[in-house]
Image (tube, coloured by chain):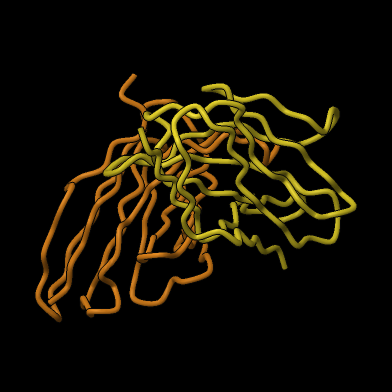
Amino acid sequence: NAGVTQTPKFRILKIGQSMTLQCAQDMNHNYMYWYRQDPGMGLKLIYYSVGAGITDKGEVPNGYNVSRSTTEDFPLRLELAAPSQTSVYFCASRLAGPSYNEQFFGPGTRLTVL
Amino acid sequence: AQSVTQPDIHITVSEGASLELRCNYSYGATPYLFWYVQSPGQGLQLLLKYFSGDTLVQGIKGFEAEFKRSQSSFNLRKPSVHWSDAAEYFCAVGAKETGANNLFFGTGTRLTVIP
């Protein structure tokens, strides 16, 4: 199993550009999450999904959109990139059921907006 | 709302020395508690978790943590640190009630190991 994979690993965007961060998991997990990690800070939840076709906002959703058309994939869309979106983005997934089920994280995407 | 405090931003220890990383949480009921480790350029890996039962939990890589309800703490310990333990460590709290079952993370503690 590849686990949780994310592409790209690095990206530089200009202000106003758009892009999609890809996330895929091959563990048949229902729950998927997008977090951002700013320097010196913990991870903050952007969006999450409890299954295909179901998504909801987390703590910091502004400026982002998500979709979940399949169990495996959970892309994150930035429509109009802003410098405040410079961060490292992590995707995670876990089995449905008790919330103490482990979240598995991808390796992250480092995004810089100039 | 849940929150997590990791008071130590950076800790330096000598290889072979003992380690304790502090974590305090805020939550109205019994929380689920986690410690994750992040090596440079990597994603997060679960070290251990507490959700019920014995308040002393054992994890991978020789780590353990103790849940102390009276102190709202979940400190991570290791009796003898190895150079490969140098990394960023995150404490996180999860709630039973929230639909998202997402985690709230502390700001992390960076561990440096001196040979």
Above or below, comparing residue A71 to residue A11 in the picture = above
Rendering quarter of residue A88: bottom left
Between residue A40 and residue B96, name the one nearer to us. A40
Residue B33 horizontal side relative to residue B106, left or right: right
Above or below, comparing residue A100 to residue A50 in the picture = above
Residue at image point 83% right, 45% down: B68
Quarter occupied by the N terminus of chain B: bottom right
Residue A64 horizontal side relative to residue B32, left or right: left
- Which chain is assigned orange? A
Residue at image point 44% right, 26% down: B82
* Position in image of residue B10 (x %, y %): 46, 56
Residue B19 horizontal side relative to residue A62, left or right: right
Quarter occupied by the C terminus of chain B: top left
Between residue B20 and residue B46, name the one nearer to us. B20
Residue at image point 71% right, 57% down: B24
Taking the view exactly as shown, the residue that stands out farthest to the right is B70
Q: How many marks?
A: 0
Taking the view exactly as shown, the residue that stands out farthest to the top is A1
Rendering quarter of residue B39: top left
* Position in image of residue A58 (x %, y %): 52, 65
* Position in image of residue B97 (x %, y %): 77, 53
* Position in image of residue A110 (x %, y %): 23, 56
Between residue B97 and residue B76, name the one nearer to us. B76
Residue at image point 46% right, 50% down: A33
Q: Colour of chain B?
A: yellow
Rendering quarter of residue A77: bottom left
Residue A44 horizontal side relative to residue A9, left or right: right
Above or below, comparing residue B56 to residue A56 in the picture = above
Between residue A14 and residue B68, name the one nearer to us. B68
